[in-house]
């Protein structure tokens, strides 16, 4: 039987051997883990191409793993004067590099991260990015050891610089294009203003030409009754002198006196009728001319006014066999711009005479007016040649005419549109088809 003390000794020896064996196994495992970690780190550095460095600030040394061999600064795995490495930084980047390093050493920044240029073995400048962190400090906070990586980002930085240059060039182009566009817009706006002024002048000229035509037509129309009146008055004067001579001679007979009486009555009636006709023409012309030359709002009896407009248009109508009929209920009082109504009707009539009845001798124009609620509805029709779809669609466009080169300005119907929509505050529609005449529907407020 083994003595007890021997058994105790054997147990202690077995325990020591077990502990030593466990420690050896743990060391082997730790060594394997370290080797595995080192291998993984090397694989990571190899795959990224980054350089791993560790800086001992107290010894002023810098050691590298996977160094960037194409750089002058990385020609040695161990550098004994790490502080001298800053001299290899491009002069333009050195201040920013030193400031970033100092700030991190002082603890003002959590990480050291800076992009800068450094020379390669061929003497060309390469863009690098170094990132690191102080991993050990003294009790007073002074940095002792710093670990980080350095990457060659030249290709990326060149792309970034090219992109910045491209963006700058693009911004410059945009500014130039914007300036050119603004200049074009200003020139276009000036051209539009000039065109509007020219159009207003043309519209005014068109109105004055229409008024001049009205004056000439009415003057010609008044000449007829005045001529007849002058002739009748001259004849009456001559017969009165003859009667006076017969009275002085004592040769006046009852029969001669009767003839004179009949002649005097007929002459007086003829003079009166023609003077009344001339008076009607003058009054119609006076009112219409005032309304056309001035754009003043006033109350009118629309039926009476349309009759005056029709009378003022008789000279133009009498040059042809065409007819015009006006239908409007009595006492249809409206508060509006009479001059605009006259010019609308006059332009529509002239449009019918020049275009609608161009190849016809029996043209008929009808103008009807009625009240619908708070609006006045005026419908203008003629039985002329009509218009195709394209002409009907463009009839109100400025300077559009189917008689280009034949005296048509293309402003008449545009004036009608402007007066109807702007001055009268209403709307105007056109309906037509080839051979079906035209129909214009004008609506405008009956009162202000």
Image (spheres, grey):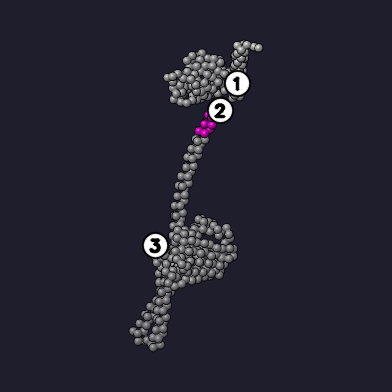
Picture coordinates of residue 43, whole percent (x, y):
61, 22
Q: Which residue is mark 3?
A: 296
Q: Secondary structure at mark 1?
A: helix
Give the overall secondary structure of the magenta segment.
helix
Picture coordinates of residue 404, whole percent (x, y):
54, 57
**What numbered label is drawn on residue 33?**
1
Image marks 3 and 2: residues in contact by CB distance under 8 Å: no
Q: Please state if 388 lies on the left or on the right of 423 as rendered.
A: right
Q: Earlier in the sequence, mark 3 or mark 2?
A: 2
Residue 266, quarter of the rendered image? bottom left
Q: Is residue 82 magenta?
A: no
The span from disc 1 to disc 2 (Cα, nearest Å) is: 35 Å
The span from disc 1 to disc 3 (Cα, nearest Å) is: 104 Å
Q: Secondary structure at mark 3?
A: loop
Front position among marks 1 and 3? 1
**What numbered label is drawn on residue 156?**
2
Picture coordinates of residue 422, whole percent (x, y):
45, 58
């Amino acid at each position: 039987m083994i003595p007890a003390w021997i058994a105790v000794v054997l147990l202690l020896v077995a325990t020591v051997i077990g502990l030593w064996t466990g420690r050896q196994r743990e060391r082997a495992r730790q060594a394997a883990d370290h080797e595995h970690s080192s291998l993984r780190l090397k694989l990571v550095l190899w795959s990224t191409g980054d350089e791993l460095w560790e800086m001992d600030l107290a010894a002023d040394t810098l050691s590298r793993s996977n160094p960037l061999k194409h750089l002058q600064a990385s020609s040695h795995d161990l550098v004994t004067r790490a502080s001298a490495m800053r001299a290899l930084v491009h002069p333009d980047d050195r201040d920013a590099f030193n400031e970033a390093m100092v700030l991190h050493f002082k603890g003002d920044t959590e990480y050291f991260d800076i992009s800068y240029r450094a020379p390669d073995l061929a003497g060309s400048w390469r863009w690098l990015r170094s990132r690191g962190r102080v991993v050990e400090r003294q009790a007073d906070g002074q940095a002792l050891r710093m670990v980080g990586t350095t990457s060659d980002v030249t290709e990326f930085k060149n792309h970034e610089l090219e992109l910045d240059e491209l963006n700058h060039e693009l911004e410059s182009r945009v500014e130039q294009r914007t300036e050119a566009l603004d200049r074009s817009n200003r020139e276009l706006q000036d051209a539009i203003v000039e065109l509007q002024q020219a159009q207003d002048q043309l519209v005014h000229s068109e109105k004055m030409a229409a008024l001049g035509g009205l004056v000439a037509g009415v003057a010609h129309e008044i000449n007829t009754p005045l001529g007849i009146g002058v002739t009748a008055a001259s004849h009456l004067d001559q017969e009165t002198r003859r009667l006076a001579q017969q009275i002085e001679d004592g040769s006046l007979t009852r029969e001669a006196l009767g003839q004179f009486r009949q002649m005097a009555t007929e002459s007086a009636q003829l003079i009166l009728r023609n003077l009344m006709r001339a008076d009607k023409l003058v009054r119609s012309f006076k009112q219409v001319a005032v309304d056309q030359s001035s754009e003043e709002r006033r109350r009118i009896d629309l039926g009476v006014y349309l009759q005056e407009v029709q009378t003022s248009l008789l000279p133009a109508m009498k040059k042809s066999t065409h007819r015009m009929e006006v239908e409007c209920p009595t006492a249809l009082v409206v508060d509006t711009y009479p001059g605009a109504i006259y010019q609308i009707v006059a332009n529509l009539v002239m449009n019918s005479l020049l275009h609608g009845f161009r190849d016809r001798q029996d043209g008929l124009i009808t103008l009807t007016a009625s009240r619908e609620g708070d609006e006045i509805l005026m419908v203008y029709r003629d039985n002329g040649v009509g218009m195709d779809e394209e002409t009907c669609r463009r009839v109100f466009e400025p300077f559009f005419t189917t008689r280009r080169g034949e005296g048509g300005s293309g402003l008449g119907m545009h004036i009608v549109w402007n007066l109807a929509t702007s001055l009268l505050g209403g709307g105007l529609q056109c309906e037509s088809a080839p051979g079906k005449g035209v129909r214009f529907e004008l609506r405008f407020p009956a009162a202000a």
